[in-house]
Image (cartoon, rainbow, N blue to C red):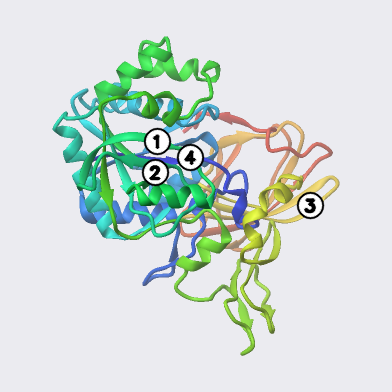
Amino acid sequence: MNIILLSGGSGKRLWPLSNDIRSKQFIKIFKTEDGYESMVQRVYRQICSVDKNAVVTVATSKAQISALHNQLGDKIGISAEPCRRDTFPAIVLATSYLHDVQGVSEDEVVIVCPVDPFVTEDYFKALYHLGKQAEKGEANLVLMGIEPTYPSEKYGYIIPASNEEVSDVITFQEKPDVKTAEGYLSRGALWNGGVFAYKISYVLDQAHKFIDFRDYQDLYQTYDTLEKISFDYAVVENEKKIQVMRFGGQWKDLGTWNTLTEAMEGEIIGKGIQNEDCQGVHIINELGIPVLAMGLHDVVISASPEGILVSDKEQSSFIKPFVDSLDQQIMFAEKSWGSYLVLDVEQGSLTIKIKLNPGHYMNYHSHKNRNEVWVVISGEGHTYVDGMRQSIRVGDVITMEAGCRHTVFAKTELQLIEVQLGEEISVHDKQKYELEW
């Protein structure tokens, strides 16, 4: 299978665990034998369990590349948008990437699906059959229609021509009110989960009707000029030769704290305690201090370096405008080499805890407006400071003046305390260089 996973958005409805860099799909809340995994790790693992030869490409923003490499490794295919332009440009870019960069034939089928639904293995088996249906060429697009479990206001609807497993599509309907949704269900309507399959040649042909470009590189370089438009509006709703395949298995959109806690196996992640009078309470705590809940009903408590949320589960769906009003420093992020956690922010200084994974290293870089000090608190490795190599271990202190080129390599898992000192401390104050050795 050729699969494009759509991994966009900031996931602010899951604040404080999500932010502009760490989207909801990277939050590790699903229990495994070894600990916890994120949405993107879970989906990728499930795809590989059904088809170990599946070619997976993640369509994402530049800000998520490091987190994807951190959680999925360096072999995953990534089509990164230079800037956000909605799903039609993103899917065209990813399709062009498969054809022009990866060398996938125009006759090959591609399956597009979001990265964040909570599903089981039967969903990925259904994706396989969706691709096989698209190979037949009976339709230009084959959609997966989710069999509704209730008249939802959150989803668009697909009206099929029959109740057969695969059917032509009569029409599409936007997100309705409950009463209208009940009417759709009486007509055998299906939820539109944003899952569909097509041949590469079809989407490239559609793209050239809207966009003047030669190939992937040309498209990438002019991406910021493209119209922001969804794939549904640009293609799906205008296509006449379109089919829908029913899917009746488990499928949940985990876009809010309310739905996310429903998918959790336990009630507590991290340090948390509930007394016996608590009912329907979930605690997700990334801080190193305990959270105690007493006498609460249907509440989610989430604590991270970004902040603390205490909310009725239903009310948590309305969090976004409040989070949008916050103007704060990103306090935690996963990088391709490891992760960092901001410990303290002061005028003229920033203190960070850095963790590098074994065998990984930072970019070779310098800063114009700040000095830095590294203190090694665990592990072993070596630094390069203006081209000079130095082995490091616990207790060592490394000082870098402004303008000094530097990087650090981790032999084992390596943890540092980094202190940034300067009047103008900014994430944009960073000049990268090619390695000099």
Q: Real-space Cα distance between discs 2 and 3?
A: 44 Å
Tell me the element at label 3. strand
Q: Is residue 300 left or right of residue 215?
A: right
> Where in the figure is residue 261, as x and y percent of width and height?
52, 67
Tell me the element at label 4. helix
Q: Which residue has dot 1 on it?
A: 172
Sequence-earlier tag: 3 or 4? 4
Tell me the element at label 1. strand
Q: Amino acid at mark 2?
A: Asn
Q: Which residue has dot 2 on it?
A: 192
Q: Which residue has dot 3 on it?
A: 345
Q: Amino acid at mark 4?
A: Ile
Q: Residue at x 36, y 13 (%)?
A: 208
Whether residues under marks 1 and 4 lie with C-beta atoms below 8 angstroms apart, the answer is no
* Dot in front, 1 or 3: 1
Whether residues under marks 1 and 2 lie with C-beta atoms below 8 angstroms apart, the answer is yes
Dot 3 alpha-carbon crowd within 10 angstroms: few under 14, some 14 to 19, many 20 or more: few
Sequence-earlier tag: 4 or 2? 4
* Dot in front, 2 or 3: 2
Tell me the element at label 2. strand
In what quadrant of the picture does the N terminus appear?
top left
Q: Is residue 69 left or right of residue 300?
A: left
Whether residues under marks 3 and 4 lie with C-beta atoms below 8 angstroms apart, the answer is no
* Dot in front, 1 or 2: 1
Residue 65 numbered mark, or none: 4
Q: Nearer the viewer, residue 123 or 190?
A: 190
> Where in the figure is residue 299, as x and y percent of width and height?
64, 71
